[in-house]
């Protein structure tokens, strides 16, 4: 939406400037004709004229003429009216150009601050939930925007686990079918803690279990057993990944994929990672779909 708005504003700006340049050039030509162009007109005096005699004594009668500077058919008041109209039109064009530039700068500044903040802090920056009644399957449940890049996996119970890697932070976010973040974990030491593999699934009580490898050799894990009612989880550390998870899914070491899709049961996540062409900050979008029974 922002890109479309910016494109429209850019076209309006270019159109206004182009019209202003063409209009001003045309008016300069008219001003030259009204005030500076020299023309000749017959003299109105009766009998006006004079003889021109060359060296041989030959004489030629020349009818009387006079030089007129500026538009001969316009009075001074008419010329001033044209100037005032040009001034009013130029003032309106200047206001429109400045308004276009000001609004474009405001959008740029807002988007710059938005992307910069989201890329620095991580986590969902916006959430769009489909609140209408779906007419069929698959249909979108929600779409979340993130700074940095993301990876996501769905769970059979209707939750999505998202790993978001921003500039100085990597976080885990558990999001339900209504787009609510029911649990999140953002380690104090930034992106390094969750840069490696993730295992997640459901235990025998239906709770979500997330195990994050904390080093490349997968010799240490940080395990979270999440209560979906309260959203509370106490992390624990272990030297082995939890076993016996129902429908276990795994995310490998954090890396940026331009797009990815994963399914679990009736749910699918679609991830799109991109880089803002104007601002240069990376951003991503996660869409959660219900595939139906």
Image: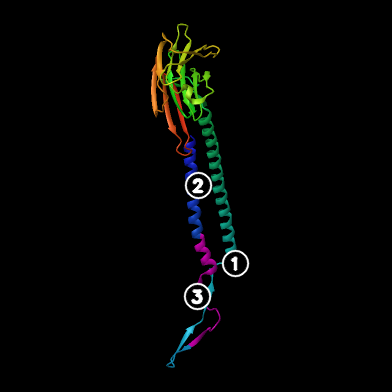
Relative placement, left or right, of 109 versus 137 is right
Q: Kindly identify which numbered label has been placed on residue 13.
A: 2
Where residue 285 appears, as percent x and y from the top left, is 45, 27
* Along the viewing direction, whichever of 20 and 30 lies nearer the viewer: 20
Q: Kindly identify which numbered label has been placed on residue 40.
A: 3
Q: Which residue is mark 1?
A: 76
Where residue 82 appears, as percent x and y from the top left, is 56, 60
* Rendered view: 186 above or below 237: below
N-terminal of the pair, mark 2 or mark 3, is 2
* Rendered view: 40 above or below 153: below
Q: Kindly identify which numbered label has been placed on residue 103.
A: none
Range of residues picked out in magenta: 27-51
N-terminal of the pair, mark 2 or mark 1, is 2
Foreground tag (2 vs 1): 2
Q: Secondary structure at mark 3?
A: strand
* Along the viewing direction, whichever of 43 and 278 lies nearer the viewer: 278
Relative placement, left or right, of 250 versus 24 is left
* Rendered view: 17 above or below 197: below
């Amino acid at each position: 939406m922002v890109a479309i708005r910016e494109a429209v504003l850019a076209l309006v700006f270019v159109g206004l400037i182009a019209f202003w340049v063409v209009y001003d050039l045309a008016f300069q030509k008219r001003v030259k004709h009204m005030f500076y162009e020299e023309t000749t007109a017959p003299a109105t005096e009766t009998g006006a004229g004079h003889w021109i005699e060359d060296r041989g004594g030959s004489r030629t009668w020349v009818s009387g003429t006079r030089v007129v500077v500026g538009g001969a058919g316009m009075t001074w008041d008419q010329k001033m009216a044209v100037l005032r109209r040009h001034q009013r039109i130029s003032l309106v064009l200047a206001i429109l150009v400045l308004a276009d530039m000001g609004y474009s700068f405001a959008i740029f500044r807002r988007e710059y601050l938005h992307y910069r903040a989201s890329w620095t802090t991580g986590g969902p920056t916006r959430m769009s939930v489909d609140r209408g009644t779906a007419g069929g399957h698959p249909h979108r449940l929600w779409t979340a925007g993130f700074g940095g890049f993301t990876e996501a996996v769905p769970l059979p119970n209707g939750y999505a686990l998202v790993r978001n890697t921003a500039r100085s932070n990597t976080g885990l976010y558990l999001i339900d079918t209504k787009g609510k973040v029911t649990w999140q974990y953002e380690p104090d030491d930034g992106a390094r803690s969750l840069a490696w593999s993730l295992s997640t699934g459901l235990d025998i009580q239906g709770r979500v279990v997330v195990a994050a490898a904390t080093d490349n050799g997968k010799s240490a894990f940080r395990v979270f057993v999440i209560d979906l009612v309260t959203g509370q989880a106490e992390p624990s550390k272990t030297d082995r990944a939890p076993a016996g998870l129902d429908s276990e899914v795994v995310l490998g070491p954090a890396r940026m994929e331009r797009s990815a899709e994963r399914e679990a049961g009736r749910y699918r996540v679609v991830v799109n990672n991109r880089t803002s062409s104007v601002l240069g900050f990376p951003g991503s979008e996660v869409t959660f779909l219900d595939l139906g029974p």
